[in-house]
Image (tube, rainbow, N blue to C red):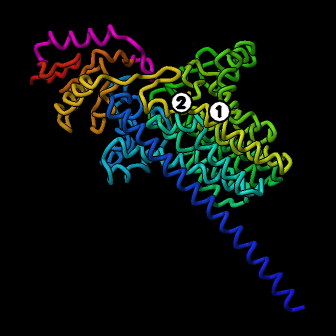
Amino acid sequence: MSVDVRVLDDARSSSRAREIARERAWEIGLWSAMTLWSLVLFGIVRNAYSGYRLGRFDLGNMTQAVWSTAHGRPLEQTMNETGEQVSRLAGHVDPFLALLAPVWVVWPSPLSLALAQVVVVALGALPVFWLGRRHLESDRAAGLLALAYLAYPWIGTSAAGAIHPVTFAITFLLFCVWALDVRRLPLFAVFAALTMSTGELMGLPIAALGIWYALARRERLAGALITVVGAAWTAIALYVIVPAFATGGSIFYGFYDNVGGSPVGVAKKLVTDPGTVLGALVETQDIAYVLWLGIPLLFLFVLSPALAAVAVPQLLANGLSDFRSMTDPRYHSVAAIVPFLFAATVLGIAKLSPGRRTIATAAVLTCSATLTLVVGPWPRAVGAVPLGGRPKLAPARIAALDAAVAKVPDDAPVTVSNTVGAHLSARRYVYSVPQVHRATWAVVDLADPWTVRPDSPILTRHPEVVRAFAASLRSNPHWRKVFEREGVLVFRRER
Protein backbone atom coordinates (compact mmCIF):
# COMPACT_ATOMS: atom_id res chain seq x y z
CA MET A 1 0.00 0.00 0.00
CA SER A 2 2.77 2.43 0.93
CA VAL A 3 4.53 1.58 -2.32
CA ASP A 4 1.40 2.51 -4.27
CA VAL A 5 1.15 5.80 -2.40
CA ARG A 6 4.79 6.62 -3.15
CA VAL A 7 4.27 5.77 -6.82
CA LEU A 8 1.21 8.01 -6.92
CA ASP A 9 3.09 10.85 -5.21
CA ASP A 10 5.99 10.43 -7.63
CA ALA A 11 3.60 10.55 -10.57
CA ARG A 12 1.97 13.71 -9.24
CA SER A 13 5.36 15.31 -8.63
CA SER A 14 6.50 14.37 -12.12
CA SER A 15 3.29 15.78 -13.63
CA ARG A 16 3.68 19.04 -11.69
CA ALA A 17 7.33 19.29 -12.74
CA ARG A 18 6.33 18.94 -16.39
CA GLU A 19 3.63 21.55 -15.91
CA ILE A 20 6.11 23.99 -14.36
CA ALA A 21 8.57 23.30 -17.18
CA ARG A 22 5.88 24.09 -19.78
CA GLU A 23 4.97 27.31 -17.95
CA ARG A 24 8.59 28.39 -17.81
CA ALA A 25 9.11 27.50 -21.46
CA TRP A 26 6.21 29.73 -22.50
CA GLU A 27 7.37 32.53 -20.20
CA ILE A 28 10.92 32.35 -21.55
CA GLY A 29 9.56 32.26 -25.08
CA LEU A 30 7.35 35.25 -24.41
CA TRP A 31 10.20 37.29 -22.92
CA SER A 32 12.30 36.41 -25.97
CA ALA A 33 9.48 37.50 -28.28
CA MET A 34 9.05 40.79 -26.40
CA THR A 35 12.78 41.45 -26.60
CA LEU A 36 12.94 40.71 -30.32
CA TRP A 37 9.81 42.78 -30.95
CA SER A 38 11.29 45.72 -29.02
CA LEU A 39 14.58 45.55 -30.90
CA VAL A 40 12.88 45.45 -34.30
CA LEU A 41 10.42 48.23 -33.40
CA PHE A 42 13.19 50.40 -32.02
CA GLY A 43 15.18 49.80 -35.19
CA ILE A 44 12.23 51.06 -37.22
CA VAL A 45 11.86 54.14 -35.01
CA ARG A 46 15.58 54.83 -35.10
CA ASN A 47 15.55 54.57 -38.89
CA ALA A 48 12.62 56.99 -39.07
CA TYR A 49 14.37 59.41 -36.71
CA SER A 50 17.69 59.40 -38.55
CA GLY A 51 15.80 59.65 -41.84
CA TYR A 52 13.86 62.76 -40.73
CA ARG A 53 10.46 61.06 -40.85
CA LEU A 54 9.64 62.04 -37.26
CA GLY A 55 9.09 65.65 -36.34
CA ARG A 56 8.56 68.32 -33.73
CA PHE A 57 4.98 67.06 -33.70
CA ASP A 58 5.08 64.96 -31.62
CA LEU A 59 8.54 63.69 -30.71
CA GLY A 60 10.01 67.18 -30.47
CA ASN A 61 7.25 68.43 -28.18
CA MET A 62 7.74 65.52 -25.80
CA THR A 63 11.51 65.87 -25.95
CA GLN A 64 11.35 69.52 -24.92
CA ALA A 65 9.00 68.79 -22.00
CA VAL A 66 11.23 65.98 -20.71
CA TRP A 67 14.45 67.99 -21.32
CA SER A 68 12.98 70.96 -19.42
CA THR A 69 12.00 68.72 -16.51
CA ALA A 70 15.49 67.26 -16.36
CA HIS A 71 16.84 70.84 -16.24
CA GLY A 72 14.65 71.99 -13.36
CA ARG A 73 11.70 73.47 -15.29
CA PRO A 74 8.98 70.81 -14.97
CA LEU A 75 7.15 70.17 -18.24
CA GLU A 76 8.00 73.59 -19.67
CA GLN A 77 7.74 73.92 -23.43
CA THR A 78 7.31 76.52 -26.12
CA MET A 79 3.65 76.98 -26.96
CA ASN A 80 3.50 76.37 -30.69
CA GLU A 81 0.43 78.56 -31.10
CA THR A 82 1.86 81.69 -29.45
CA GLY A 83 5.59 81.18 -29.00
CA GLU A 84 5.26 81.64 -25.23
CA GLN A 85 6.93 79.46 -22.61
CA VAL A 86 4.22 77.56 -20.76
CA SER A 87 3.68 74.35 -18.85
CA ARG A 88 2.62 71.44 -21.01
CA LEU A 89 -0.34 71.17 -18.65
CA ALA A 90 -1.87 74.12 -20.50
CA GLY A 91 -2.66 71.74 -23.33
CA HIS A 92 -2.49 68.11 -22.22
CA VAL A 93 -2.53 66.99 -18.60
CA ASP A 94 0.09 64.27 -18.90
CA PRO A 95 2.51 64.66 -15.96
CA PHE A 96 3.73 61.15 -16.77
CA LEU A 97 6.33 62.82 -19.00
CA ALA A 98 8.12 64.03 -15.88
CA LEU A 99 8.78 60.38 -14.97
CA LEU A 100 10.84 60.06 -18.15
CA ALA A 101 13.35 62.70 -17.00
CA PRO A 102 15.66 60.05 -15.44
CA VAL A 103 15.64 58.23 -18.77
CA TRP A 104 16.85 61.43 -20.42
CA VAL A 105 19.57 61.89 -17.81
CA VAL A 106 20.91 58.40 -18.52
CA TRP A 107 20.70 58.79 -22.30
CA PRO A 108 20.07 62.41 -23.41
CA SER A 109 18.53 61.64 -26.78
CA PRO A 110 14.99 61.65 -28.19
CA LEU A 111 15.64 58.01 -29.04
CA SER A 112 15.80 57.15 -25.34
CA LEU A 113 12.16 58.27 -24.99
CA ALA A 114 11.19 56.27 -28.07
CA LEU A 115 12.92 53.20 -26.66
CA ALA A 116 11.13 53.59 -23.33
CA GLN A 117 7.78 53.68 -25.13
CA VAL A 118 8.55 50.58 -27.21
CA VAL A 119 9.72 48.58 -24.18
CA VAL A 120 6.74 49.54 -22.01
CA VAL A 121 4.25 48.69 -24.77
CA ALA A 122 5.98 45.32 -25.28
CA LEU A 123 5.44 44.53 -21.60
CA GLY A 124 1.69 44.60 -22.23
CA ALA A 125 2.05 41.03 -23.50
CA LEU A 126 2.56 39.89 -19.89
CA PRO A 127 -0.90 40.71 -18.49
CA VAL A 128 -2.44 39.30 -21.68
CA PHE A 129 -0.57 36.05 -21.03
CA TRP A 130 -1.50 35.99 -17.34
CA LEU A 131 -5.18 36.63 -18.11
CA GLY A 132 -5.09 33.89 -20.72
CA ARG A 133 -3.45 31.39 -18.41
CA ARG A 134 -5.97 32.13 -15.68
CA HIS A 135 -9.11 31.94 -17.81
CA LEU A 136 -8.17 29.60 -20.65
CA GLU A 137 -6.34 27.12 -18.41
CA SER A 138 -3.80 26.60 -21.16
CA ASP A 139 -0.30 28.01 -21.42
CA ARG A 140 -0.39 27.40 -25.15
CA ALA A 141 -3.59 29.38 -25.70
CA ALA A 142 -2.36 32.12 -23.37
CA GLY A 143 0.97 32.27 -25.16
CA LEU A 144 -0.67 32.49 -28.57
CA LEU A 145 -2.81 35.42 -27.40
CA ALA A 146 0.24 37.18 -25.94
CA LEU A 147 1.98 36.76 -29.30
CA ALA A 148 -1.18 38.04 -31.00
CA TYR A 149 -0.90 41.17 -28.84
CA LEU A 150 2.60 41.77 -30.23
CA ALA A 151 1.38 40.96 -33.75
CA TYR A 152 -1.72 43.21 -33.55
CA PRO A 153 -1.00 45.91 -36.16
CA TRP A 154 -2.19 48.90 -34.13
CA ILE A 155 -0.03 47.97 -31.15
CA GLY A 156 3.04 48.15 -33.39
CA THR A 157 2.05 51.39 -35.11
CA SER A 158 1.28 53.05 -31.76
CA ALA A 159 4.59 51.95 -30.25
CA ALA A 160 6.48 53.16 -33.32
CA GLY A 161 4.75 56.56 -33.22
CA ALA A 162 7.36 58.31 -31.10
CA ILE A 163 6.15 59.40 -28.64
CA HIS A 164 2.82 59.93 -26.87
CA PRO A 165 2.26 59.53 -23.13
CA VAL A 166 -1.10 57.81 -23.65
CA THR A 167 0.61 55.06 -25.63
CA PHE A 168 2.27 53.92 -22.41
CA ALA A 169 -1.25 53.50 -21.01
CA ILE A 170 -1.88 50.53 -23.31
CA THR A 171 0.24 48.43 -20.98
CA PHE A 172 -0.89 50.21 -17.80
CA LEU A 173 -4.55 49.53 -18.59
CA LEU A 174 -3.89 45.86 -19.29
CA PHE A 175 -2.22 45.63 -15.90
CA CYS A 176 -5.27 47.37 -14.42
CA VAL A 177 -7.60 44.73 -15.86
CA TRP A 178 -5.39 41.90 -14.65
CA ALA A 179 -5.05 43.40 -11.16
CA LEU A 180 -8.82 43.71 -10.83
CA ASP A 181 -9.28 40.21 -12.19
CA VAL A 182 -7.09 38.77 -9.43
CA ARG A 183 -8.44 41.31 -6.91
CA ARG A 184 -5.15 43.02 -6.15
CA LEU A 185 -6.49 46.50 -5.51
CA PRO A 186 -3.23 48.12 -4.30
CA LEU A 187 -1.53 47.02 -7.53
CA PHE A 188 -4.51 48.28 -9.51
CA ALA A 189 -4.22 51.65 -7.77
CA VAL A 190 -0.60 51.99 -8.91
CA PHE A 191 -1.38 51.27 -12.54
CA ALA A 192 -4.56 53.33 -12.47
CA ALA A 193 -2.54 56.32 -11.23
CA LEU A 194 0.03 55.76 -13.97
CA THR A 195 -2.76 55.54 -16.53
CA MET A 196 -4.40 58.77 -15.46
CA SER A 197 -1.04 60.56 -15.44
CA THR A 198 -0.78 60.00 -19.21
CA GLY A 199 -3.68 62.24 -20.20
CA GLU A 200 -6.66 64.28 -19.15
CA LEU A 201 -9.19 61.84 -20.63
CA MET A 202 -7.60 58.73 -19.17
CA GLY A 203 -9.79 58.93 -16.09
CA LEU A 204 -12.71 57.83 -18.28
CA PRO A 205 -11.50 54.26 -18.93
CA ILE A 206 -10.64 53.97 -15.23
CA ALA A 207 -14.17 55.09 -14.36
CA ALA A 208 -15.62 52.59 -16.83
CA LEU A 209 -13.42 49.85 -15.36
CA GLY A 210 -14.90 50.65 -11.97
CA ILE A 211 -18.40 50.08 -13.34
CA TRP A 212 -17.29 46.77 -14.88
CA TYR A 213 -15.68 45.68 -11.61
CA ALA A 214 -18.80 46.55 -9.63
CA LEU A 215 -21.14 44.66 -11.96
CA ALA A 216 -19.04 41.77 -13.28
CA ARG A 217 -17.17 41.00 -10.08
CA ARG A 218 -19.89 42.21 -7.68
CA GLU A 219 -17.43 44.49 -5.87
CA ARG A 220 -19.85 47.39 -5.64
CA LEU A 221 -18.09 49.58 -3.08
CA ALA A 222 -14.62 49.25 -4.63
CA GLY A 223 -16.08 49.64 -8.12
CA ALA A 224 -17.98 52.78 -7.16
CA LEU A 225 -14.85 54.29 -5.60
CA ILE A 226 -12.81 53.54 -8.73
CA THR A 227 -15.51 55.12 -10.90
CA VAL A 228 -15.64 58.27 -8.79
CA VAL A 229 -11.84 58.68 -8.76
CA GLY A 230 -11.57 58.17 -12.53
CA ALA A 231 -14.35 60.60 -13.36
CA ALA A 232 -12.98 63.13 -10.87
CA TRP A 233 -9.53 63.03 -12.46
CA THR A 234 -10.88 63.89 -15.90
CA ALA A 235 -13.14 66.62 -14.52
CA ILE A 236 -10.33 68.19 -12.48
CA ALA A 237 -7.89 67.94 -15.37
CA LEU A 238 -10.27 69.64 -17.84
CA TYR A 239 -11.88 72.23 -15.57
CA VAL A 240 -9.17 73.01 -13.01
CA ILE A 241 -5.67 72.09 -14.22
CA VAL A 242 -5.87 73.18 -17.86
CA PRO A 243 -7.54 76.56 -17.08
CA ALA A 244 -4.93 77.17 -14.37
CA PHE A 245 -2.14 77.01 -16.95
CA ALA A 246 -3.93 78.28 -20.05
CA THR A 247 -6.13 81.22 -20.96
CA GLY A 248 -9.62 79.79 -21.29
CA GLY A 249 -10.37 76.11 -21.83
CA SER A 250 -8.46 73.44 -23.65
CA ILE A 251 -7.42 74.38 -27.15
CA PHE A 252 -8.23 70.79 -28.10
CA TYR A 253 -11.93 71.52 -27.65
CA GLY A 254 -11.63 72.78 -31.21
CA PHE A 255 -11.62 69.15 -32.34
CA TYR A 256 -15.30 69.05 -31.36
CA ASP A 257 -16.60 72.33 -32.80
CA ASN A 258 -19.21 70.57 -34.94
CA VAL A 259 -20.80 68.81 -31.96
CA GLY A 260 -20.65 71.48 -29.27
CA GLY A 261 -16.99 72.29 -28.73
CA SER A 262 -16.63 71.01 -25.14
CA PRO A 263 -17.98 68.24 -22.89
CA VAL A 264 -20.81 70.50 -21.71
CA GLY A 265 -21.38 71.69 -25.27
CA VAL A 266 -21.66 68.12 -26.54
CA ALA A 267 -24.21 67.32 -23.82
CA LYS A 268 -26.29 70.37 -24.80
CA LYS A 269 -25.99 69.50 -28.48
CA LEU A 270 -27.21 65.99 -27.76
CA VAL A 271 -30.41 67.49 -26.31
CA THR A 272 -30.95 70.28 -28.85
CA ASP A 273 -29.65 68.59 -31.99
CA PRO A 274 -29.18 64.85 -31.40
CA GLY A 275 -29.03 64.12 -35.12
CA THR A 276 -25.77 66.03 -35.50
CA VAL A 277 -24.13 64.23 -32.59
CA LEU A 278 -25.32 60.78 -33.63
CA GLY A 279 -24.44 61.51 -37.25
CA ALA A 280 -20.86 62.29 -36.23
CA LEU A 281 -20.55 58.76 -34.85
CA VAL A 282 -21.69 56.89 -37.95
CA GLU A 283 -19.60 58.49 -40.65
CA THR A 284 -17.85 56.17 -43.08
CA GLN A 285 -14.49 56.66 -41.41
CA ASP A 286 -15.94 55.87 -37.99
CA ILE A 287 -17.38 52.58 -39.22
CA ALA A 288 -14.13 51.70 -40.98
CA TYR A 289 -12.28 52.51 -37.75
CA VAL A 290 -14.29 49.99 -35.76
CA LEU A 291 -13.78 47.38 -38.47
CA TRP A 292 -10.01 47.92 -38.53
CA LEU A 293 -9.90 47.56 -34.74
CA GLY A 294 -12.02 44.43 -34.66
CA ILE A 295 -10.94 42.38 -37.67
CA PRO A 296 -7.49 41.38 -36.31
CA LEU A 297 -9.27 40.01 -33.20
CA LEU A 298 -12.02 38.38 -35.28
CA PHE A 299 -14.47 40.40 -33.14
CA LEU A 300 -14.23 37.72 -30.46
CA PHE A 301 -14.38 40.44 -27.81
CA VAL A 302 -18.16 40.58 -28.37
CA LEU A 303 -18.32 37.32 -26.38
CA SER A 304 -17.38 39.40 -23.32
CA PRO A 305 -19.43 42.54 -24.00
CA ALA A 306 -19.22 44.05 -20.52
CA LEU A 307 -15.43 44.34 -20.58
CA ALA A 308 -15.36 45.35 -24.24
CA ALA A 309 -17.78 48.17 -23.37
CA VAL A 310 -15.08 49.79 -21.23
CA ALA A 311 -13.60 50.96 -24.56
CA VAL A 312 -16.78 52.92 -25.38
CA PRO A 313 -15.79 56.28 -23.78
CA GLN A 314 -12.68 56.57 -25.92
CA LEU A 315 -14.52 55.31 -29.01
CA LEU A 316 -17.08 58.06 -28.51
CA ALA A 317 -14.40 60.70 -27.95
CA ASN A 318 -12.65 59.64 -31.14
CA GLY A 319 -15.79 59.31 -33.22
CA LEU A 320 -17.15 62.74 -32.23
CA SER A 321 -13.88 64.49 -33.09
CA ASP A 322 -13.48 66.53 -36.27
CA PHE A 323 -9.77 65.61 -36.28
CA ARG A 324 -9.58 62.64 -38.64
CA SER A 325 -6.43 61.15 -37.13
CA MET A 326 -8.45 60.25 -34.04
CA THR A 327 -10.31 57.64 -36.10
CA ASP A 328 -7.19 56.30 -37.76
CA PRO A 329 -6.18 53.07 -35.97
CA ARG A 330 -2.48 53.68 -36.57
CA TYR A 331 -2.42 56.56 -34.12
CA HIS A 332 -2.20 56.78 -30.34
CA SER A 333 -5.92 57.48 -29.94
CA VAL A 334 -6.41 53.69 -29.74
CA ALA A 335 -4.61 53.60 -26.37
CA ALA A 336 -7.78 53.45 -24.24
CA ILE A 337 -9.54 51.07 -26.64
CA VAL A 338 -7.18 48.25 -27.54
CA PRO A 339 -6.45 47.03 -23.97
CA PHE A 340 -10.11 46.31 -23.34
CA LEU A 341 -10.68 44.68 -26.70
CA PHE A 342 -7.76 42.35 -25.99
CA ALA A 343 -8.81 41.58 -22.43
CA ALA A 344 -12.39 40.99 -23.58
CA THR A 345 -11.07 38.69 -26.32
CA VAL A 346 -9.34 36.58 -23.65
CA LEU A 347 -12.52 36.35 -21.56
CA GLY A 348 -14.60 35.77 -24.67
CA ILE A 349 -12.49 32.87 -25.87
CA ALA A 350 -12.73 31.40 -22.37
CA LYS A 351 -16.45 30.92 -23.02
CA LEU A 352 -15.71 28.56 -25.90
CA SER A 353 -15.28 24.84 -25.43
CA PRO A 354 -11.74 23.76 -24.47
CA GLY A 355 -11.21 22.19 -27.88
CA ARG A 356 -11.99 25.44 -29.67
CA ARG A 357 -9.91 27.77 -27.52
CA THR A 358 -6.54 26.96 -29.05
CA ILE A 359 -8.09 27.14 -32.54
CA ALA A 360 -9.52 30.58 -31.76
CA THR A 361 -6.29 31.92 -30.31
CA ALA A 362 -4.29 30.59 -33.27
CA ALA A 363 -6.77 32.24 -35.64
CA VAL A 364 -6.43 35.59 -33.85
CA LEU A 365 -2.64 35.34 -34.03
CA THR A 366 -2.73 34.42 -37.73
CA CYS A 367 -5.13 37.24 -38.63
CA SER A 368 -3.22 39.87 -36.63
CA ALA A 369 0.15 38.80 -38.02
CA THR A 370 -1.14 38.77 -41.59
CA LEU A 371 -2.60 42.25 -41.32
CA THR A 372 0.43 43.72 -39.59
CA LEU A 373 2.62 42.61 -42.49
CA VAL A 374 0.47 44.76 -44.75
CA VAL A 375 -0.60 47.77 -42.66
CA GLY A 376 1.55 47.63 -39.51
CA PRO A 377 4.90 49.24 -38.81
CA TRP A 378 7.00 46.52 -40.43
CA PRO A 379 6.63 47.63 -44.09
CA ARG A 380 8.29 50.91 -43.16
CA ALA A 381 11.50 49.02 -42.46
CA VAL A 382 11.86 48.36 -46.19
CA GLY A 383 10.66 51.74 -47.35
CA ALA A 384 7.00 50.96 -47.98
CA VAL A 385 4.47 53.41 -46.59
CA PRO A 386 1.09 51.67 -46.15
CA LEU A 387 -2.08 53.75 -45.72
CA GLY A 388 -0.17 56.96 -46.40
CA GLY A 389 2.67 58.46 -44.37
CA ARG A 390 6.11 59.89 -44.97
CA PRO A 391 8.28 58.17 -47.58
CA LYS A 392 12.00 57.72 -47.18
CA LEU A 393 14.16 60.69 -48.14
CA ALA A 394 17.04 60.56 -50.57
CA PRO A 395 20.47 60.11 -48.93
CA ALA A 396 21.64 63.49 -50.24
CA ARG A 397 18.75 65.27 -48.56
CA ILE A 398 19.30 63.43 -45.27
CA ALA A 399 22.96 64.45 -45.39
CA ALA A 400 21.91 68.06 -45.99
CA LEU A 401 19.54 67.97 -43.02
CA ASP A 402 22.26 66.45 -40.81
CA ALA A 403 24.64 69.23 -41.82
CA ALA A 404 22.00 71.88 -41.14
CA VAL A 405 21.23 70.50 -37.67
CA ALA A 406 24.93 70.45 -36.84
CA LYS A 407 25.16 74.18 -37.56
CA VAL A 408 22.82 75.16 -34.72
CA PRO A 409 24.42 75.59 -31.25
CA ASP A 410 22.97 73.36 -28.55
CA ASP A 411 21.52 76.18 -26.44
CA ALA A 412 20.44 78.59 -29.19
CA PRO A 413 16.77 79.57 -29.57
CA VAL A 414 15.68 78.22 -32.95
CA THR A 415 12.73 78.10 -35.33
CA VAL A 416 12.49 74.94 -37.38
CA SER A 417 10.56 73.02 -39.98
CA ASN A 418 8.66 70.09 -38.51
CA THR A 419 10.94 67.25 -39.64
CA VAL A 420 13.97 69.06 -38.22
CA GLY A 421 12.17 69.72 -34.95
CA ALA A 422 12.65 66.21 -33.57
CA HIS A 423 16.42 66.81 -33.69
CA LEU A 424 16.51 70.33 -32.27
CA SER A 425 13.90 70.41 -29.49
CA ALA A 426 16.17 69.66 -26.52
CA ARG A 427 16.50 73.34 -25.64
CA ARG A 428 14.54 76.01 -23.85
CA TYR A 429 13.25 77.96 -26.84
CA VAL A 430 12.17 76.18 -30.01
CA TYR A 431 9.57 77.53 -32.42
CA SER A 432 7.89 76.15 -35.50
CA VAL A 433 8.08 77.79 -38.92
CA PRO A 434 6.96 80.50 -39.61
CA GLN A 435 7.23 81.79 -36.01
CA VAL A 436 10.41 83.63 -34.99
CA HIS A 437 10.01 85.28 -31.56
CA ARG A 438 13.34 84.84 -29.67
CA ALA A 439 14.92 82.63 -32.31
CA THR A 440 18.49 83.45 -33.28
CA TRP A 441 18.72 80.53 -35.71
CA ALA A 442 16.32 79.19 -38.31
CA VAL A 443 16.37 75.88 -40.15
CA VAL A 444 13.95 75.77 -43.07
CA ASP A 445 13.30 72.71 -45.20
CA LEU A 446 11.53 73.90 -48.34
CA ALA A 447 10.25 70.37 -48.98
CA ASP A 448 8.55 70.23 -45.57
CA PRO A 449 5.18 72.00 -46.06
CA TRP A 450 3.80 71.66 -42.53
CA THR A 451 3.23 74.80 -40.45
CA VAL A 452 1.36 75.82 -37.30
CA ARG A 453 -1.50 78.31 -37.28
CA PRO A 454 -1.94 80.54 -34.20
CA ASP A 455 -5.52 79.24 -33.75
CA SER A 456 -4.73 75.53 -33.98
CA PRO A 457 -2.70 72.98 -31.98
CA ILE A 458 -2.03 70.85 -35.05
CA LEU A 459 0.03 71.07 -38.19
CA THR A 460 -1.49 72.20 -41.47
CA ARG A 461 -0.08 71.84 -44.96
CA HIS A 462 0.95 75.23 -46.40
CA PRO A 463 4.03 75.00 -48.66
CA GLU A 464 3.49 78.58 -49.80
CA VAL A 465 3.90 79.78 -46.20
CA VAL A 466 7.21 77.94 -45.89
CA ARG A 467 8.52 79.42 -49.15
CA ALA A 468 7.39 82.91 -48.16
CA PHE A 469 9.07 82.55 -44.75
CA ALA A 470 12.36 81.51 -46.34
CA ALA A 471 12.13 84.41 -48.79
CA SER A 472 11.48 86.87 -45.95
CA LEU A 473 14.60 85.70 -44.11
CA ARG A 474 16.66 85.96 -47.28
CA SER A 475 15.65 89.58 -47.74
CA ASN A 476 15.84 90.56 -44.08
CA PRO A 477 19.12 92.39 -43.32
CA HIS A 478 19.00 91.14 -39.71
CA TRP A 479 19.31 87.52 -40.86
CA ARG A 480 22.20 85.94 -42.74
CA LYS A 481 22.05 82.68 -44.65
CA VAL A 482 24.87 80.40 -43.50
CA PHE A 483 23.90 77.16 -45.24
CA GLU A 484 21.91 75.99 -48.26
CA ARG A 485 21.83 72.54 -49.82
CA GLU A 486 19.12 70.31 -51.27
CA GLY A 487 16.45 72.86 -50.41
CA VAL A 488 17.53 73.02 -46.75
CA LEU A 489 18.46 76.50 -45.50
CA VAL A 490 20.01 77.71 -42.25
CA PHE A 491 19.86 81.37 -41.20
CA ARG A 492 21.50 83.13 -38.27
CA ARG A 493 20.24 86.35 -36.76
CA GLU A 494 22.82 89.12 -36.95
CA ARG A 495 22.97 91.20 -33.80
* Of residues 399 and 427, the one drawn nearer to the viewer in this rendering: 399
Residue furthest to the right in view is: 1
Instruction: Label 2, secondary structure: give it.
Output: loop
Give the left or right position of residue 162, taking residue 171 as reference. Answer: left
In percent of the image, x 66 and y 63: which residue is there? 23
Residue behind mark 1: 314
* Of residues 203 and 150, the one drawn nearer to the viewer in this rendering: 150
Amino acid under disc 2: Tyr
Tell me the distance, in whole angstroms, between the alpha carbons under discs 2 and 1: 13 Å
Residue 112 in view, yes or no? yes
Q: Is residue 189 magenta?
A: no
User: Which badge, 2 or 1, is on the more N-terminal residue?
Assistant: 1
Q: Position of residue 409 (x, y in %)?
A: 17, 35
Image quadrant assignment for residue 73:
top left
Relative to 302, is 144 above or below? below
Residue behind mark 2: 331
In percent of the image, x 56 and y 19: which residue is there? 324
**Label 1 crowding class (10 Å Cα cut-off): few <14, some 14-19, many 20+?**
many
Instruction: Magenta stretch: give its range.
Output: 453-480
Give the left or right position of residue 131, taking residue 236 as reference. Answer: right
**Of the two numbered discs 2 and 1 in the rendering, the one whose residue sits closer to the viewer:** 2
Amino acid under disc 1: Gln
Residue 85 in view, yes or no? no
